[in-house]
Amino acid sequence: MDCYRLWLSVGRPEDGDIFLRMKQAKADYKKALNDCKVAKECQIGDGLYDALMDKDKNSFWRSWKCKFGKKDSRSKIIEGSRNKDDVASIFKQFFSKTCIPNNEDIHYVHKNEFLQKFALYSTEEKCVNVFTVVDIENALLKIKKGKMPGIDRLSAEHLLFAHPSLIVSLKMLFNVMYANGFVPDDFGRGLLIPLLKDSNADVTQCDNYRGITISGVISKLFEYVVLEKYSDYFNTDSLQFGFRKGVGCSDALFTVKSVVNHFTKNGCTVNVSALDISKAFDRVSHYALFSKLMARKFPKHLIKVLMSWYTKTMIKVKWFDSESDFFQTTAGVRQGGILSPFLFAIYIEDVLLALKAQGKGCKVGNTYLGCILYADDILLLSQSVSCMQNMLCICNDVAMLLDLKFNVKKSSVLRIGNRCMAKCSDLRLNGVIVPFVEEIKYLGIYIRKSTKFLRSMSLAKIKFFRCFNSIYSKASRAGEDVLVNLFNSYCLPLLTYACEAIFPTRSELRMLDKLVTTVFNKIFHSFDSSVISYARLCFDICDIEDILRKRNLSFLSRYYSKNFSFVNMIAGLNCCNAFTNL
């Protein structure tokens, strides 16, 4: 700095001894900055490497997330306002308009029908000392640690490490609540945090945020206790793959692929329609839901508890360190609730049951496989366009009864089979044309229009390279072991997602292998095929096809052992393909 000030004081000469000294000092300064940067990167890399070598995964990921965790994507300005209190109020107004019925008239019809039936409803049940200490202890083991506390400022750790007498007190509280069909006011209160839906969206608009509600830990514990005690009442049809223990997206995708391939191999062209419900979870009619619980013979006291709970649902928005006033929700299942996904699955099941009752959609023998549900994602399968139109009409009628609305702009249809390119009559949903498309997104993959069931890997490749380049730019000096471990944890799953259910074609396998080789070239700074092959062998990523075949074998073993009502039929359809893949 002294050389630079001297150079300034003498009029910034462009040659001479003072100029040369200034240039040398500037070069030394830049070199020192670069050395500090390199030293910091090496220090981070050494910390990650040490944790990895010590097999301390918690320390490894803690160090990684501390240094390179996601940045806060929230904007400082929302809808033109910068003040945090004002922004919290803006979000309050936005979300309060979301959790209301679509149609007030239908809402009151559901309310009147339920109250009339509920007055006469009775079930034989035990309502005193329903829950035991063992029930509370088992529920405590299911609560996740390290989560943000709710409005009550209590976290799971407060309950887990409290005196054992607390369990007795909670047992008494829960039994009193159940016997009286009543919950405390704080059970209904939640803290809503807006999160950006898409990083590429306009961060200043409320529409691009979704709300995540944090509930009180004691209310969550009660829900776990109820769910465990009355789990049989929450069972849904096998074609609803969402919110079921041990069932995931791969199971739904494998079922869809099996049905489509069966029909296309027999010369049919299958119409596949993906439907989107607008704000499905937020528009559930409470009284229509309670009526469905009565139809399932839920205990009357449990329905009373839920009624009390949903009349006390109050939410306030938290934006940075500011909070809005409370607002009440008059529709929708409780966000952040443990029971909410199961209640929604019961609510939306009417769509599937209506289609199955009328026999609309793909059937194999007497087994109905024409509608696949995964939470609120609805996929319709039909071997004719006219049948698909009938299915869309049925779905629309059921949605109107449930006070739900389909978002036709996000719904689409594609055709798979020999006549996939043939032009067909327009399909309409609620009077609006549902477009035929080249590909649809379903459960994280893109299904292509083709003569057989195929997925598109283009977006997966883009995400893969984006993810690896992001990691490599931050941890290029971290060492090969660390980089390969990060590659396995973050990058490879993006490529191999659902490959156990939809096994890649030969060309896709070659593409996957080439992508892995490209990454290893960059990590090990070598294009020598023998070096890369040895490195992949050392890290057990030698043969992608072999890895995926093992995953496929494990997946098929789990799938065929599940208690789906249609599992034997799917096994029969896939017997030839399954043995080929094995």
Image (spheres, helix red, strand yellow):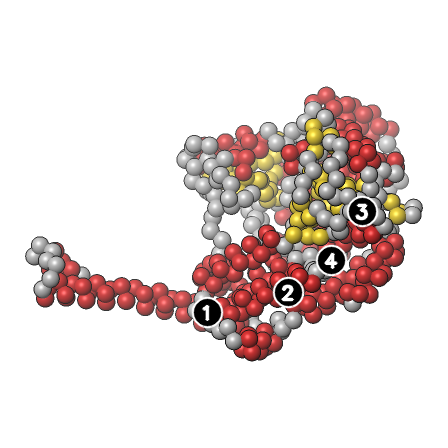
The three-letter amino acid code for the residue at tag 3 is Leu
Q: CA distance from mark 4 to mark 3?
A: 16 Å
Identify residue for label 1.
478
Q: Residues within 10 Å of mark 1 (few under 14, many from 20)?
A: some
Q: State how many labels appear.
A: 4
Q: In front: mark 4 or mark 3?
A: 4
Identify residue for label 3.
239
252 w.r.t. 283: above or below? below
The three-letter amino acid code for the residue at tag 1 is Ala
Q: Is residue 225 visible?
A: no
Secondary structure at badge 4 equals: loop
For marks 2 and 3, the one nearer the N-term is: 3
Identify residue for label 2.
510
For marks 1 and 2, the one nearer the N-term is: 1
Identify residue for label 4.
501
For marks 1 and 4, the one nearer the N-term is: 1
For marks 4 and 2, the one nearer the N-term is: 4
Q: State yes or no: discs 1 and 4 in contact (Cβ < 8 Å).
A: no
Q: CA distance from mark 1 to mark 4?
A: 35 Å
Q: Is residue 421 visible?
A: yes
Secondary structure at badge 3 equals: loop
Q: Quadrant of the C terminus?
A: bottom right
**Residue placed at 88% from the left, 35% from the top?**
358
> In the visual, does 113 lie left or right of 514?
right
Q: Residues within 10 Å of mark 4 (few under 14, many from 20)?
A: many
**Residue placed at 75% from the left, 35% from the top?**
424
The three-letter amino acid code for the residue at tag 2 is Arg
